[in-house]
Amino acid sequence: MKHRYLPMTEQDKTEMLAAIGVTTVDELFSDIPEKVRFKGEYKIKPAKSESALLKELSTLAAKNADLIQYTSFLGAGVYDHYAPIIVDHVISRSEFYTAYTPYQPEISQGELQAIFEFQSMICELTGMDVANSSMYDGGTALAEAAMLSVGHTRRQKLLVSTTVHPESREVIAAYALGRNVEVVEIPHTNGTTDLDELKNLMSEDVAGVIVQYPNFFGRIELLKEIEQVVHEQKAMMIVSSNPLALGVLTPPGKLGADIVAGDAQPFGIATAFGGPHCGYFAVTNKLLRKVPGRLVGQTVDENGKRGFVLTLQAREQHIRRDKATSNICSNQALNALAASVAMTALGKNGVKEMAMQNIQKAHYAKKALQKKGIDIVFDGASFNEFVIKLPVPFKQCNDALFEKGMIGGLDLGRFYPELTDHMLVAVTELRTKEEIDTFAAEVGEM
C-alpha cells in the first residue's frame, strides 16, 4: 500500500479495470486525441514521506503570527474572544464531527437538537421570532437577507449604510448584480448612518435598508429612528449584528427589525485566519416561509416523546427550483454547535459579563490612547471597536507594533480613502490592562 489515505492495491486496480473491460488506465482516455493530451510533468514538488511532509508543514505553520504568541488588536468582523475549553471537546466527538445533513431524524436526534438549541439562542439574543439552522458566514447571510427583502416587497432598490462592513457590502452588490437590483449607499456622519440622507434617499421603490449594529466603526446606530424612516415607506429594516454585543444592547427585534443577520464567530469559533465561521439569520414570523436554508422544529412522536425534525427546507435541492427562496446549499452545523456550546457554557450572565468587559476595556483603551496624545475619531457610544488617527503612516505603525509582539488594528484607508492612516482598533475581554497600556504607549511614542 503506497498511500496511507488511498488504500488501493495493485490487485484492486487490476480487478477494477477488468470489470469495465480495459487493461490499462491509459485506455480510459483513448477517446481523447493524442495531440491534446498533457505529456509533461506537473510543476509540483516530488512526494515526501509522511514524517518529512509533517516537518515541512510544521515549519511553514510556525511562520504564522498566531494569537498565542502575539497580542491582537485586530477585529473588523473576526475577533479574539474567550472560548470555553468544553467547546473543542464537544465538537470533536465523532457523532458531531463527522455528521452531515440530518435527513434521517430517527438517527440524527443529537444533531437536530443541537441545531434547534442554536436557533433558540439566536432568537433570544436578537429578539426575533424565528432563526434558521445557520448559514456560511455573516456576509452571505446579510446578502440573503437583502434578497429576501427584494422578493418579499417586489421592489428593486436597496439602501446600504456605508457603516456596514465593506466586504459585506461587496457581497450584497454581487448578489444584486444578478438580480438587476439597484444598490445605493447611505453616507455616514460622525461614524453613524446619516439620518437626513436616509430620509432623502427613501422612496416607494426601496425594498430594504441595511445597517450594522454595532457598525463597522464600532459605533451604536440609532435603530429606533432608522426604523421609523424605513417603515414609513413600507420597506424592510435589515440589521447586521455582532451577537455578543446583544448581550448588553437592546436586541434589534425589539427596535423593529424585520431581519437580523450576522456571524456567530464571537461565540466559541476560532479566528482561524478568517474562517470558516457561522452565519445566523433571524426573522419575524411573517417571513417564516421565506427564510433561506432550513429550520429544525420540535415535535412529538407517536408515543408522545419529544423529537426534532427538519421542519422547513427552502432551497432548490429540496423543492421545485422556481419555488426556492435561496440556492444556499448547506449550513455550518459544526460551527453552529460550537457557538451553542459556548453560549450554554457562558450562560445568560456570562454572555452579559463578557459583553460588558468588551465595552469597559475598549473604553479604557480610548482613555489610555488619549493620554498619549492620540485622537479618537467618531466620539460617542461604541462596543469593542473604535477609530484612531495615527501620527505616522499606517504601515510604519503596524510594522513597529509587530516588532513588539502586537498585531495592530485594521487599515481603514483600504476601504475609506478619507480615513487614510486611520486604524480600527478592537479590544476584547481577553486584553489585559498591561497589554492595553503597552499598546497605547507604543502608538503614543510614534
Image (cartoon, rainbow, N blue to C red):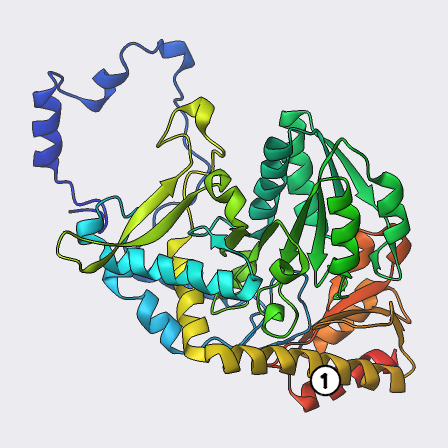
Q: Is residue 434 left or right of residue 87?
A: right
Q: Is residue 214 left or right of residue 258?
A: right
How many callouts does the rendering have? 1
- Placement of the C terminus among the 4 image quadrants: bottom right
Where residue 215 sits, quadrant-wise, is: bottom right
Where residue 58 sits, quadrant-wise, is: bottom left
Residue at x 77%, y 74% (from the top left corner): 400
Decide if residue 56 is in sight here. no
68 lies above or below 181: below
Residue at x 48%, y 53% (from the top left corner): 130
The answer to which of 186 and 149 lies nearer the viewer is: 149
| Residue 247: percent from left, percent from top | 58, 73
| Residue 212: percent from left, percent from top | 70, 56
Where residue 208 sits, quadrant-wise, is: top right
Residue at x 76%, y 81% (from the top left corner): 363
| Residue 238: percent from left, percent from top | 66, 49
Q: Residues within 10 Å of mark 1 (few under 14, many from 20)?
A: many
The answer to which of 278 and 57 lies nearer the viewer is: 278
Q: Secondary structure at mark 1?
A: helix
323 lies above or below 311: above
Decide if residue 268 is in sight here. yes
Q: Which amino acid does the dot numbered 1 rest on?
A: Ile
383 lies above or below 278: below
The answer to which of 15 and 129 lies nearer the viewer is: 129
- Which residue is denoted by mark 1 in the rendering? 436
Residue at x 49%, y 61% (from the top left corner): 122
Q: Is residue 148 left or right of residue 95?
A: right
The answer to which of 127 and 218 lies nearer the viewer is: 127
